[in-house]
Amino acid sequence: MKSKLLVLAVLILLPAVFMALGPQSLTAASSDAQQSSQLKDNGIGPVKSVTLGKTIDKKMVDEGQSIFFGKCSLCHAMNSQKLAPPLAGVTKTLSPVFIMNYLLNTAQMQEKDPYIQQLMQYYQSVPKMPDQNLSKSQARAVLEFLRSTAK
Ligand code: HEC
């Protein structure tokens, strides 16, 4: 009887805690299994494969960083929650191809990709991410910059 009450209390409290934590809890809530299957998702768009160097390309990082400060930092910070999710380490949960497709084909991914749709649910109160009109090589540079922020 007592344990039934306990289970009931947990069931009632869990969603409340979840809601109070807000968007930050998304990463915590998604299990390792979900994350590794997310890494296999290439998204929808013009990019079919990306070749990554063994080491980080510093020149590309510089270009990517300046694009980031010009076009992304209004909404995104690296390590903290701003209007949108923090991006440090995002290359560990999203594949390089997925990231590039999302940057180059934002609207269609928002319409059709289940992961992005789930993310948009959490960020309902924020305008959805606009397409930043990056060229393929700019998107590649941003990817390199994001890669450089993963520990
Ligand atoms: C106007 C605000 C805004 C700007 C500017 C913006 N984003 Fe976003 N971004 C968002 C929001 C909101 C989301 C959540 C999903 C969505 O709305 O599509 C998001 C999601 C993401 C994600 C997925 C994060 C995750 O945890 O899976 C990545 C990667 C990303 N943005 C990269 C970028 C990059 C790179 C730029 C600049 C080229 C950029 N964003 C510019 C608002 C923005």
Image (tube, helix red, strand yellow):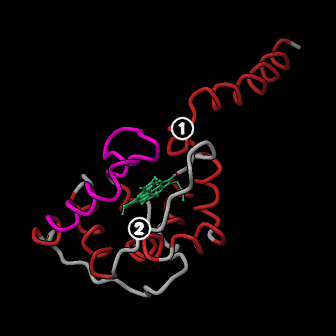
Which disc, if any, is residue 132? 2
**In the image, which residues are magenta?**
62-88
Is 116 rendered above or below residue 7? below
Q: Is mark 2 within 8 Å of ligand 1?
A: yes
Is 146 rendered above or below residue 141? above
Residue 121 is situated, as x and y percent measured from the top left of the image, at 65, 50
x 24%, y 52%: residue: 151
Which disc, if any, is residue 70? none
Q: Quadrant of ligand 1?
A: bottom left
Q: Which residue is mark 1?
A: 25
The residue lying furthest to the right in this view is: 1
Characterize the local packing of mark 1: few (<14), some (14-19) or many (20 or more) Cα atoms within 10 angstroms: some
Helix, strand or loop for disc 2: loop
The amino acid on which the numbered mark 2 sits, given as a three-letter code, is Gln
Q: Is mark 1 within 8 Å of ligand 1?
A: no
Residue 143 is situated, as x and y percent measured from the top left of the image, at 30, 68
Characterize the local packing of mark 2: few (<14), some (14-19) or many (20 or more) Cα atoms within 10 angstroms: few
The amino acid on which the numbered mark 1 sits, given as a three-letter code, is Ser
20 vs 68, left or right, is: right
Is 76 rendered above or below residue 46? above
